[in-house]
Amino acid sequence: MPLERYVTDGAPRFLEELFAFLRIPSISTLPERADDVRRAAAFVAEACERAGLRAVVHETAGHPIVVGRSEHVPGAPTVMLYGHYDVQPAEVADGWDGDPFEPRQVGDVIVARGANDDKGQVYAHIKGLETVRAVDGALPLNVIVLVEGEEEVGSVHLVPFIEEHRDALACDVIIVSDGTMAEPGRPSIAYGIRGSCGVTIEVRGARADLHSGNFGGAVPNAVQGLAQLVAGMKGADGRVRVEGFYDAVIVDEEERRRIARTPFSEPDFLELAGVTAVAGEVGFSTLERMWTRPTLELNGLVGGYGGVGSKTIIPATAVAKITCRLVPDQEPDDIVAKLRRHVERHAPAGLDVRVRSEGGSRPAVMDTRGAGLQVAARVASEVWGRPTLLVRGGGSIGIIAEFQRVLGVDPVLLGFGDKDDGIHGPNEKFGVTNYLNGIRTSARLVRALADMA
Amino acid sequence: MPLERYVTDGAPRFLEELFAFLRIPSISTLPERADDVRRAAAFVAEACERAGLRAVVHETAGHPIVVGRSEHVPGAPTVMLYGHYDVQPAEVADGWDGDPFEPRQVGDVIVARGANDDKGQVYAHIKGLETVRAVDGALPLNVIVLVEGEEEVGSVHLVPFIEEHRDALACDVIIVSDGTMAEPGRPSIAYGIRGSCGVTIEVRGARADLHSGNFGGAVPNAVQGLAQLVAGMKGADGRVRVEGFYDAVIVDEEERRRIARTPFSEPDFLELAGVTAVAGEVGFSTLERMWTRPTLELNGLVGGYGGVGSKTIIPATAVAKITCRLVPDQEPDDIVAKLRRHVERHAPAGLDVRVRSEGGSRPAVMDTRGAGLQVAARVASEVWGRPTLLVRGGGSIGIIAEFQRVLGVDPVLLGFGDKDDGIHGPNEKFGVTNYLNGIRTSARLVRALADMA
């Protein structure tokens, strides 16, 4: 039986099994869902076993990590498939049309929390392995399935885990399917993602809010001071004015030319973002701004009164939340230190200003000439019938740089989802076609990677 | 019986009567308290009648205005005593040590909502009139007691009322006791107050908050844009950078010299304000900044996330609340128009920015050589045993400029309260001595003003 027939015939069952996975509300951030998270780990382990792997559920100080392994094929390469079984919170009240954990098929899409991010993509790989094994009788190479339960809460226990199991996790290729395609029906591989870091700035002026008449004009205003401080962090040219912010940033002229050739529709982008104009750093295109340039984003500024009418106070306190997206070779700790120094230098007189680090993750760029990436691009093109697009991403997946650092492998970011799937939002969806093509891609990839060496 | 004996003997009863007034929760801003507000109006009217005045409760579209009048004394001057019977909201949960509407005497102070602001001061005047009538047999001049029930909600119906009753309210002197003394035991008359105006600035960028990774660097950020906009409204020199803001401001060199001679302790001020340093416009002293210089105060800026940890969004909306304190000859409408123009000129690209006026009031400065002010200063000095201080105030009492405009009289702002009485806050208080000296001052003032002409 050919591979294609197996996937087509198996589709109803593949959907049914995924639905069972989606019914488990494995929300990693909610302590009261810890048992559900554990159930989801067990579900993944069982699915691996049924696909012919030996699966182990590794306990951590947080949620478990599932590792599935195929029977050893001597001399064959090893591919790791990474994903996560935990999901973001979801409640009907957030705007869902139905129970987020009662998956349903609406036309050509599956609607449920985790349908895209990341259960649908993880399960596509497991079904891909099952397919190869059923059609070919055995897997032609070594497979490690690594599925964690803390991706939505920072993957805190995964980094020490891969450090500790560095030898057992040694591999030639890492495939990460936890993302989207650049445009519908157009397979894409992201060869770069940005890192991140964040700070909270807290400002205090007076002991308590003061009357703006009795004291106005003579005492410092915490919100005004904080607004001035954060306004000074960016110039009118969209450049970050924190000293040394761009020091480590690499500008690759060859890449700039490649990005200039990447298809991009500004009207489509404006529509997707829901804005009337693009903005950003002068001298760079919109794709460059999102993919290759670091950012300093004010995620929030809250201080004083924001309600109806007037409240004639001089606010005593204010807080600002800032996160940066980082690009190679910026280091999160270094950028936080530079932000801290900037705040110390520019803190308005009479205000007590404190900076707290909110953690971060390293940026990563992968070699586009890597064999795994090249094979994945070719296979995806065949399945989808269109040339695979090489892109970068603006977001951050902290584990990618850690895979590079600890395992010495450039992960291949091969997302099966669509941009408008609404991950983290209400009515998250995943195309049935995306799911089945994911299975096809995974199965063919396993075959093709076996021939790679 | 001399006046002093009457007040001393009457003190227990004066306190008891004030307590009955304070028991009425006449909170003008709460619709469910409308009946209590009406009861307070009736209480004032009755108190006026018992002091020998004829009192009328005038209905308005809001809360009633009480006008009490003495029997006409031909050829004698007319003094108007203005105050208000409505109070700010108060609940035990705000931090009161007991029921805010069950007044109690604690040592030398009366604790209750309205004790200082303004029931205690209004009632001191009514008891002052009673005292003169009891001791002298009749009032020596014409008295108008004007007590409104909407001071805490903007005196909206009082302005049309005085316009409509312009002739009936014609007078030679207006005494306003709705304030505090510059220092404890030191009688003070404020000969100037600031006006005010306010705007709300609303900013919208994208349709909804965006992911700071997927879009960061390429789209406008509403909070960042608003922070830049408001930061640009003030220079490092503390001067407002809204074009034309200072155009109408009068600088009076003689007054600057007078203010320089006014006692002022910076350590005491820092302690009172609860700040570590003063701030403000270069070239002006702290008293000048509060009394004679206009301000632009950011009362609040709220947008995006301000909670624990990070939220990696590009906020779609933000709101800023700004109020200005105005000095002669700034006009609230003109300053709002200038703010509007500034925002239009400096609105960051790609953001929808709206400005809404929140109303305002005119500033006022009174002639310090006015006969009424001079007499009041002399009488207060005699009662308190210390020379009366001439000061200005930083706050706003909208009706003052309207009294000037409509009735052509410079009000005398003779406050009986202490600075630390905590008006509008929990455990509002009013000294028993302040109350009784208020009665003495009022009684002696009525006598002295009769001789003025």
Image: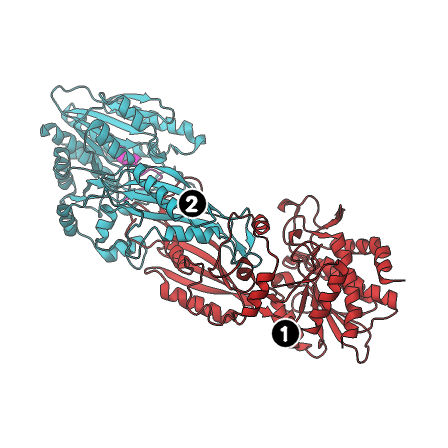
Chain colours: A red, B cyan
Q: Which mark is residue B238?
A: none
Q: Is residue B266 above or below residue A400?
A: above
Where residue A71 appears, as percent x and y from the top left, is: 82, 74
Q: Quick check: can you spot residue B87?
A: yes
Q: Residues within 10 Å of mark 2 (few under 14, many from 20)?
A: few
Give the residue type that dot 1 points to. Answer: Gln
Looking at the rendering, in which quadrant would you find the C terminus of chain B?
top left
Please state if B298 lies on the left or on the right of B163 as rendered.
right
Label 2 close to label 1 by CB (< 8 Å): no
> Which secondary structure lies at badge 1?
helix
User: Viewer-proximal residue, A187 or B241?
Assistant: A187
Please state if B88 lies on the left or on the right of B294 as rendered.
right
Please state if B71 lies on the left or on the right of B30 as rendered.
left
Where residue A372 appears, as percent x and y from the top left, is: 71, 71
Tags 2 and 1 on a common chain = no
Where residue B364 appears, as percent x and y from the top left, is: 23, 38
Q: Is residue A249 above or below residue B340?
A: below
B298 drawn magenta: no
Looking at the rendering, in which quadrant would you find the N terminus of chain B?
top left
User: Viewer-proximal residue, B182 or A96?
Assistant: A96
Where residue A441 appears, as percent x and y from the top left, is: 76, 62
Query: Residue at 73% across / 69% down in the picture?
Result: A375
Q: Is residue A32 above or below residue B83?
A: below
Q: CA distance from mark 2 to mark 1?
A: 56 Å
Q: Which mark is residue B94?
A: 2
Query: Residue at 37% across / 50% down in the picture?
Result: A209
Residue tagged 1? A404
The span shown in magenta is B108-123
User: Viewer-proximal residue, A220 or A296?
Assistant: A296
> Which secondary structure lies at badge 2?
helix
**Residue B29's quadrant in the figure?**
top left
